[in-house]
Image: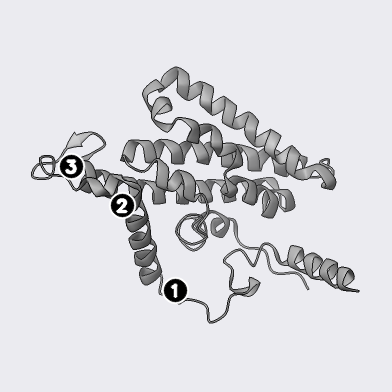
Amino acid sequence: MKDKKKPLSAEFTKGLLKENPVLVMLLGMCPTLAVTTMASNAIGMGLATTFVLVCSNLVISLLKGVIPKAVRLPCFIVIIAGFVTLISFVMQRYLPSLYQSLGVFLTLITVNCIILGRAEAFASKNKVLPSVLDGLGMGLGFTLALLAMGSVREILGSGSWFGMKIPYLKHDPMTVFIMPAGGFFVLGCIIALVGKLSHKKPPKEISCENCPAAAICGKDREDCSAAESEAAE
């Protein structure tokens, strides 16, 4: 029996908090920790990733019927890489300082597990509009998480916010917050805060059923279980 389809609004809002890719699913940790030393870098990376998410979900959903299953992942990566190249060229031309600040992490959007994960788990199995809304919601959730981290780390670690100096903090900032240890600390605190606000309790046991993405990969779990049973026989 098939599950009831979610309303379109739910496809958009789930990525903001309930299935936030950073704060709930713990995806995209590399750029999350690397570029959030400044709020401007964080929002730049978040918006660039959102653009790639929306566009790649759109194209993959349109082409899902013609992409051979055996080569779907290479095809997804080629599509994603095309949009990453486009946003890199645009940013290099119009936002050169941000382009330099993001550095290699901009091109690494191609292999960001959030984008590839949404392509495989959602866009390749759903219609165009839900796929676009899913990409937009996940992208904005990613952007908000990075912005929250970048704001806290820049304010406490540099005594500024978006480059604007903050009185009383600019003269004696806590530089540990712009170091890797500070990034892990801020990330842990924000994840704990989100868990507290959403009244989310740790699962009693680790299983697919307790995963936030369980609703969209149920068929894959059945296929995987069937393949494991055949292999065991």
Label 2 and label 1: CA atoms lie apart by 25 Å
- Disc nearest the viewer among 2 and 1: 2
First in sequence: mark 2 or mark 1? 2
Which labelled disc corresponds to residue 159?
A: 3
- Disc nearest the viewer among 1 and 3: 3
What amino acid does circle 2 point to?
Answer: Gly
First in sequence: mark 1 or mark 3? 3
Vertical order, 119 against 92 (above or below) = below
Crowd class of label 1 (few under 14; some 14 to 19; many from 20; radius 10 Å): few
Q: Can you identify the residue that label 1 sits on?
A: 200
Seen from the viewer's position, the closer of residues 198 and 195 is 195
Asked whether, in this view, residue 169 is left or right of residue 189, the answer is left
Q: How is the image coloured?
A: one colour
Query: Residue at (33%, 52%) from the top-left corner?
Result: 181
Label 1 and label 3: CA atoms lie apart by 33 Å
Vertical order, 180 against 162 (above or below) = below
Query: Residue at (59%, 56%) from the top-left corner?
Result: 8
Query: Residue at (43%, 47%) from the top-left corner?
Result: 32
Seen from the viewer's position, the closer of residues 232 and 170 is 232
Query: Residue at (68%, 55%) from the top-left corner?
Result: 121
Q: Can you identify the residue that label 2 sits on?
A: 182
Q: Position of residue 210 (x, y in %)?
A: 58, 73
